Image (cartoon, rainbow, N blue to C red):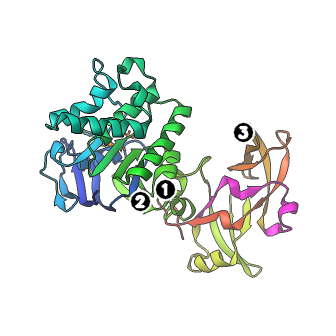
Amino acid sequence: MAEVIIKDVEKVYPGGFKAVKGINLDIHDSEFIVLVGPSGCGKSTTLRMVAGLEEISGGTVSIGDRVVNDVPPKDRDIAMVFQNYALYPHMSVYKNMAFGLKLRGMKKPDIDERVRWASSILGLDTLLERKPKALSGGQRQRVAVGRAIVRQPAAFLFDEPLSNLDAKLRVETRAELKRLHHKLQTTTIYVTHDQEEAMTLGDRVVVMSEGLIQQVDAPLTVYERPVNRFVAGFLGTPPMNFLSGALTSKNGGVFFEGEGVSLKLNEEQADNVASHIGQDVTLGLRPEGVYMHANEHANDEDRTAELEVNVIEPLGDTMDLFLDTSTGARLVARVKAEHLDLGTKVKMYVDPTKIHIFEPGEYGNNI
Ligand code: ATP
């Protein structure tokens, strides 16, 4: 068990490209932390520096109470599972799991105990004599995890371990990893570009972009209280809607006005944005914050927008509506499924608690 502390860590690749620009992160003992962000944001590089597979250009990484910058990977007391978990094809499942322990000089009965312990946790008991080619993708992935857990390391590092599995298996294996962590309580750092994986697995989620950490928080906090527009737009499916406009004060309230929409903020928001009245802002609106049949939800003209239905994507009991404002701006709403014709004008009610107001720009702060 161990704490992992990343302090002012930088990575400059040969040639001068700065992939990680000075990040700080305290990963608590037993914590499951997920690094998430778009391709190229530096999450794998960060993980590989913790693993010792990439030299650290600046700052320090500590595992337990030891700075490991100059400690070789095999002596860092970590186990890593990659996307391309290469099992030894000529070895049985048992031998694949035992191999690393044998290399470390562990005695046979101890190895046996560890392998049987890991295989019972992972449900591999009946597959121990099989070769990897006689296993399904999901079973192979479990063996790769088994190889990591037999070592009983201080920390697990996962780099997109599920991305080679099909959608159904990915969800199942994700649940298994969560159960495993619950059981073993080993400090885990998990890298993914999949926001759903990040939200379901992480005790905390670290959102990265362009070599920097944007936000570190519990999944729901990151979703409900994103610090800036980047984080808000990265998490959520379909993504948050953004409209450009300005804040105005009228009829005793504060309104967002822009791109053909005028929406009254609630009192709490009005207080928060008081110093920004008259300024340009970006409105962020979650698709599930827009409801059909405005009058049934609230008789509130100030929070209603008339929008034209442009595309309908049925999803079963819900549907995504792609709606155009009078100036042609596009909004997506996730609503209860019902019959609707394209081109219809619908009155939509916007739930003010699902609104965020950001300063302008790609990384505009949540006001
Ligand atoms: P992905 O999800 O695509 O793997 P990532 O967030 O894990 O992305 P990294 O692999 O950490 O991103 O890469 C961060 C940046 O560093 C990218 O712009 C990448 O092109 C660059 N990079 C990675 N490895 C090297 C290298 N060996 N030499 C130079 N640049 C590199």
**Bounds of the magenta span?**
282-302
Residue 147 lies left or right of residue 126; in this view the side is: left
Label whose residue precedes the other's in the sequence (1 or 3):
1
Residue highlighted by disc 2: 214
Residue 26 lies, in percent from the top left, at: 31, 63
Count residues near mark 3 (Cα–Cα under 10 Å), then give few for <14, some for 14-19, many for 20+. few
The disc labelled 3 sits on which kind of residue? Leu
Count residues near mark 1 (Cα–Cα under 10 Å), then give few for <14, some for 14-19, many for 20+. many
Image quadrant in which the N terminus is located: bottom left
Residue highlighted by disc 3: 315
The disc labelled 1 sits on which kind of residue? Phe
CA gap between label 1 and label 2 equals 8 Å
- Rendering quarter of residue 316: top right
Image quadrant in which the C terminus is located: bottom right
Q: Is residue 297 magenta?
A: yes
Label whose residue precedes the other's in the sequence (2 or 3):
2
Residue 160 lies, in percent from the top left, at: 40, 39
CA gap between label 1 and label 3 equals 27 Å
Q: Secondary structure at mark 1?
A: helix
CB-based contact (under 8 Å), mark 2 and mark 3: no
Residue shown at 34%/36% (left/top)? 116
Q: Nearer the viewer, residue 244 or 128?
A: 128
The reply to whether residue 187 is in sight is: yes
* Mark in the foreground, 1 or 2: 2
Q: Nearer the viewer, residue 242 or 148?
A: 148
